[in-house]
Amino acid sequence: MNKVLLFLVLSAFPNTLLFVEGGPNFSGLTQKVARRGVSSLSKSIPALSVWEAHQGQCSSRRSMEVAVKRKRQLDIPQKVIDGGGFYYGITGDTLSKASKPGAIKKRLSLSDSMYEALEELKTMRKEMEQMRSDMQKLRWKMLMDGDLEGDTEENKEKEKILKRKRAKEADSLSKEIEKWAKQVLLETEEDGWKNVECSKMMRKTLNPDGLTTASIKWMKDSRGDKADKNDETEYPCIRCSSTIDAPMEDVCTYLSQESALPDYNDLVVEYKDVEEISPSAKICASWTPQILFIKRREFVTFCHHKWKKDGSEVIVSQAWTHHDFPETKEESSGKACRAYALRGANMISRCPDDADKTVITMISHANPGGNVPAWACKTAVNAMAPVEPFKIFQKINKNVKQNLPQLRERLEEAEMVSSPSGRSPRPAGIAQLGYACFWPKGGGTVEGAPKALVDRNGDRIANAPYDQSSQEEATEEGGGD
C-alpha cells in the first residue's frame, strides 16, 4: 500500500519529494503536498489569490483565510456563488453591487402583476383614443382640402350625407328635450317639487320685488334612452323663472355675447366649442370652479337653439360624450372630474302682461359626478339654491338695462346680415350651470319659416321653390326645422 501511495505522489509532484537520511519522510511529504496543492488552487482562482507578505514569505494559508473573511464581509448571495461566477474572476466591486438590497429584483406577486398589466392597458387605451382623434381630425382636414386620392368626390359626398344625418338627429333630440322641459314646467308640488326661497340675508339685493321664483326636485337620470339604466341615484333638478325689465330682443342679444358671461354667471369659469353639428347645434365643453367641498368639474354638453314663431328663443341641452374629451371619473386623478348637465332648457319670451319686459325660464338637471356622497351633494345644493338662481337673474336685469344702447346697435347690425332660408341671423347663446354656448353669427332655425328644397347632400337646388309642406309637417310635430 505504501509503495502504491509513493508512486502516485512521485508521479503527481516529482519535484516536491525531499530525500533525507533514513529514507523518505512521509509526514513532511504530506504537509508539503498539502501546501503546494493549496498554492496551486489559489493561483488558479483569481478571486482567491489574495497574497499577503508575512515575515518575508507568502502564506497560502493566510490568503485563503483572508479570501474567506472578505467573502463574509461582502455578504455575497449564495445563488451567485453557487452559479459559478465567484470562481471565474468576478471582482469584489461587482459582487458588492450584486449583494446590495434591491440589486436582485424580487419576483412580483400575481396581484402586483395584474395591477401593472391594468395600468399598462389604461395607458394604451388613452394613447389609442388620442391616435383615433388625431386620425379623425386629419381625415376631416384631408376631405375638406380634397387631398384624399382616388375617391375624393365620393368621400365628400359621404361626408355631406353624414353631416346632414347628424343635423337631423340633433333637431330630433332638441324636440325631445323641449317636450321634456314643457312637462317639467307643468308639474306641481304633488309631483315632488319644493319651493326655494331666496336667502334672507340677500333678499333685498337679489329679489327685492319677488319677481324671481325657484323650486327643486330630486330625480333620476332624465336623458330618456341615453340615461344610465344602472344608476338609481336621484340628482337635483332646479327650475326658476324671472321677469327682466327690458325688451326680449335686447335680453337675447345680451345673453348671446360671450364677453358678458363672467358678468352674470360665476359658475362657469372656462368654456370652449368642441364640435359644430349644424348651424344651430354644437358640442361644448365647460369647467366650473370648486364649490364648497365639490372640486373643479368638467362638463361636455350638447346644445341646440331655435326661434319660435313669436320671436322667443329656446336653448336646450343634454350631457354628451366626445372622443376629444375622455371622462375622468375620480377626483384623485389630478384632473377636473367629469360632471353631467343631464338635461336643461332655457326659454326667453316676451312678458304676456308687458311687451317691453322679458320672461326667462331656466331648467337644470345635473349630476355632480365623482361619486360625491348623497349628504355632501344635498349640503352643497341646499347652500347654492337660495342664492345662485336669484343672483343670475338680478345680474342679467342690471347689465341689460345698463347696456341698452349698445345692445340695440348690435341687434341692428345682425339683422342686416343675410342668412340661409329657414335660419335666423340673430346671435344667440347663454351660460347656465354646467355649460355655456354661443352662436355669434346666428344660425338658429326659425319655426314656421319656409324651407328651401335641397338635394340629398343638403345643398339648395338653384331656382327651386320653397317647400312649404315639409315646414308645415315639422310645425305640426311641435316646432322648428
Image (cartoon, helix red, strand yellow):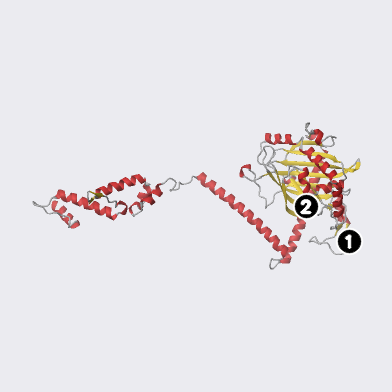
- Can residue 176 be seen here? The reply is no
Q: Are marks 2 and 1 in contact (CB under 8 Å)?
A: no
Q: Position of residue 115 (x, y in %)?
A: 54, 46
**Pointer 2 residue:** 281
**Pointer 1 residue:** 465
Q: Nearer the viewer, residue 113 or 250?
A: 250
Q: Which residue sits furthest top? A: 200
Image side of residue 161 versus residue 83, left or right: right
Residue under the image location 79 percent in, 37 percent down? 390
Q: CA distance from mark 2 to mark 1?
A: 26 Å
Task: Specify few, some or many for label 1: CA neighbours under 10 Å numbering under 14, 14-19, or 20 or more.
Answer: few
Amino acid marked by disc 1: Pro
Q: Nearer the viewer, residue 434 or 402?
A: 402
Mark linked to residue 381: none
Circle 2 SS class? strand
Q: Which residue sits furthest bottom? A: 150
Q: Nearer the viewer, residue 97 or 338?
A: 97
